[in-house]
Image (tube, rainbow, N blue to C red):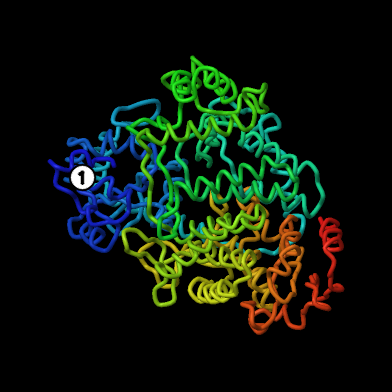
Amino acid sequence: MEGSNKAETRTPNSLIKEKSPYLLQHAYNPVNWHPWGKDALQRAKVEDKPIFLSIGYSTCHWCHVMARESFESEQTAKILNENFICIKVDREERPDLDEIYMKAVQILAGTGGWPLSVFLTPDGKPFYGGTYFPPKPVHDLPAFNDILQAIVTFWHDNREQLQRGSEDVTELLRDSYRHKPYSGEVSVDLLDDLYEQLAAQFDPDYGGFGADVAAWSVKRPKFPLPCYLSFLLRYHYRTGEKSALAMVTQTLHAMAWGGIFDQVGGGFHRYSTDRYWLVPHFEKMLYDNALLSRVYLETYQVTGDPIFAQIGKETLNWALREMTDPDGGFYSAIDADSEGVEGAFYVWSPDEARSVLGAERGEAICRYLGITPQGNFEGGKSILHKAEPEPSDAAESEDTIREAIEALLLARNQRIRPATDDKILTGLNGLMIRAFATGYQVLHERRFLEAATSSARFILENLVKDGQLCRRYRDHEATIPGTLEDYTFFVAALLDLYEASFDSEWLREAFRLNDAMIELFWDDADGGFFFNRHGETDILAAIKEAYDGPVPSGNSIAAENLLRIGALAGVEDMRRRAGDIFLAFGAQLEESPLAHTQILSAVDLYLNSPTQIVIAGDDLEDASEFVDEINRHFLPDKVIAFAGSRAADDPDPDLVPLTKGKVSIQGKPAVYICENYTCKAPITELEDLRRVLSSRR
C-alpha cells in the first residue's frame, strides 16, 4: 500500500483507525489526514482553516501517482498541515460525497475524475477544485504547491470574495437536483430518440461509442458502457431492429478479442485507452464485470453465439477465483499497478511465454495472442489480445490454446499481484449476485447459483442492522448507512435470485427491503428517490439523480424493481410509483437520453408491461425442462414464479397472488403466460412452450 513502506519510521495519521483500504494507503503519509466526519469539520471551524478534500479509491492509478509525488512529500505536507484541514474520502464508501463534490469541480473547472481535489470553506462549501495536480507545471496544469500557496494567500486576503463564490457554487449544486416539472408523456418516442443517438455515436469499425465518431483518434479512451448495450438488446427485442443487435454483437466481439479482456485470467479491465480495445487501463472493477458478464450472457440468449457464453463464463470464473471472500461476499476491485508499474502483472514478452510453454507451442501462442519482440506496450512488452481470432493450424487447436492459457495463468500467478480492495459493498454485491443468477439460468452451472446464494446470505447476515442495510463490510465491521443504490441493487439481486432458484425466502426479503427503501428514500413532494436517507445532514444538498454512468443510477433500478414487484405481487401502487419516477426525471430523459440509458430500459419495461409467467408443478425438479426452456430465451419483460405443492418452498399465494389457481394438469407441469391481466391457456408440452417463446420478440 502507498506509504506503508515507511511505516516503521513515520507516525501514522488519523486514517490508521479506518477500515477502507484506500484510506489505509494514506495512513502513513506525512500529511495530517482526517476521515470525513464531525471532528474534522469542527476542527476547520475552530482553527479557521480551509479544507483540502481529496477523494479517490484504492485501485486508482492516478491517485497513486499523486500520492507518490505530493502526499508523500514532506514539503507539500508542511504546506497542507500548516494551512489546511486535510480530509481523505474513499469514493466507494461515500458515493454521496463523491457525487456532490465531483459536480462542484465540474462547475468550477469544467472537468472531473480521480483523484478529486477540492478546496472547501470550513462549512464544507467548495470554492476551487480539480483532479490530478502535478508537483511541477506540466502541459496546462499548475504545480500543486503553487496552487496551495495561492489559495492560502487568497484565503487571507480575499476571504469575502471566496465565500461568495462558494455560496454561488453551492446554490448551483442544489439547483441541479431540483428537477423541472415534466409536461410531456412517457412514450416510445423517448426510446426511439435514444436509439438514434446511440446509432449516431457508434464506431462502425471497432464497435463501442464516442461523442464524435469522425474524430476518433488512437489515444481516445473507449469505455465498455454496458448500460448502452443492455438498452440496445431491449430495443431489438421490442422493435426487431437488426442494427441495434448488430451494434451490441460487434462491440462485444471486439472487446472479447482485445486487450481490455484479460485473455489469460478472464474478466475485463476498466476501459481501453485507444479506439481498438487494445491497450487497457488495467484496473478491474467488480461492477464492470458484473454488468458486462450479464450483457454477454443475455446476448448469448439472443444470438446463440457460443463466444458470448464463453466470455460471460470466463468473467464469472474470474470473479469466483479472485473476487470472492471465503465467507461469501465479493470484493470491490483489483489495482492497475503492481510493483509501482501499471499493467506489469498482465504483459508478456516472447521469451517469457516460451519459457513457460516451450519453443514450438510458445511460438504458436505468441502468434495467436499477439506477443511480439517489439511489443505493443511500455518496455517492449505485449498486451495479450486475439491477433488471430481463429486458430490457424493444429498447433493452435482449441485444446492446445486452452492448455497453454492455463499454463500461462499458473505462471502469472507467481508474479507479484496487484492489490485487491477487499471491502465488500452491498450495492456492488447486488450487481454481482445478478450476474451469477443469470449465469446459472443461462449456463446451468450450479456453482454460479451457489455463489449468488452465498453472497446474498452474507449481506443479510452481516450488513443488515435493525432491519436496514449498511453499505460497507470489512475486517468484521459493517458500517455506513446504505444508500439508494445499495437497496435497489440488492433488491434486484434478490428478485433475480428468486427467479433462478424459486426459493421464496429471497422474494420475502426483496419485498421487505423494497418497502423499507420507499419509507427511507421516497420524495413525497415530487416523486423519485433521494440518494441518501431522509434526515442525513452531512452533505450540502439532497441528491436526487437518475444519471446512468458506469453503474446504473439507483432510480433506474428502483423503477425496474417496482415494476417487477408490482407484477409479481399484484400491487398497482408499485407501477404508479415507477411512473412517478419517470415523470420526476422526464425533462432530463428528453434532453439527454444518452445519460439515462438504464432508466430508459425501465421505461421500455413500463411501456411493455411485464409478462407474467407461472410454472406449476408438483415439484421443481419435475418442471426443470420447462424452466430451462424459459431461461434459454431472452425475455426482458418477464417476471416468473413457481407454484408447486404446499409442501414445497414455493411462495405463499398471498405473497404472490399471481400463483393462485395455477396448478399442474393431469400430473404434468403447466406453464401459464399472462399479459395485460389475461392468462393464455396453460401449456403442458415442451414443444408448444418453445414455439410460443420463439414467436415473441
Residue 559 seen anywhere in this rendered image of the structure = no
Q: Is the residue marked by circle 1 packed among few (<14), some (14-19), or many (20+) residues within 10 Å?
A: many
Q: Nearer the viewer, residue 117 or 171?
A: 117
Residue 452 seen anywhere in this rendered image of the structure = yes
Q: Is residue 47 left or right of residue 63?
A: left
Q: Is residue 554 left or right of residue 300?
A: left
Q: Nearer the viewer, residue 655 or 30?
A: 655
Q: Residue at x 50, y 48 (%)?
A: 319
Q: Is residue 596 left or right of residue 193?
A: left
Label 1 sits on residue: 28
Q: Residue at x 59, y 70 (%)?
A: 527
Position in image of residue 153 (x %, y %): 23, 41
Q: Residue at x 55, y 33 (%)?
A: 403
Residue 386 is drawn in which quadrant? top right
Q: Secondary structure at mark 1?
A: loop
Q: Quadrant of the C terminus?
A: bottom right
Position in image of residue 268 (x %, y %): 53, 40
Q: From the viewer's perspective, is residue 337 above or below residue 637?
A: above
The number of numbered badges drawn on the structure is: 1
Q: Residue at x 42, y 46 (%)?
A: 105
Residue 343 is drawn in which quadrant? top left
Position in image of residue 249 (x %, y %): 71, 40
Residue reaching furthest to the top: 373
Q: Quadrant of the N terminus?
A: top left
Position in image of residue 484 (x %, y %): 50, 65
Residue 150 is drawn in which quadrant? top left
Indicate the amino acid at tag 1: Tyr
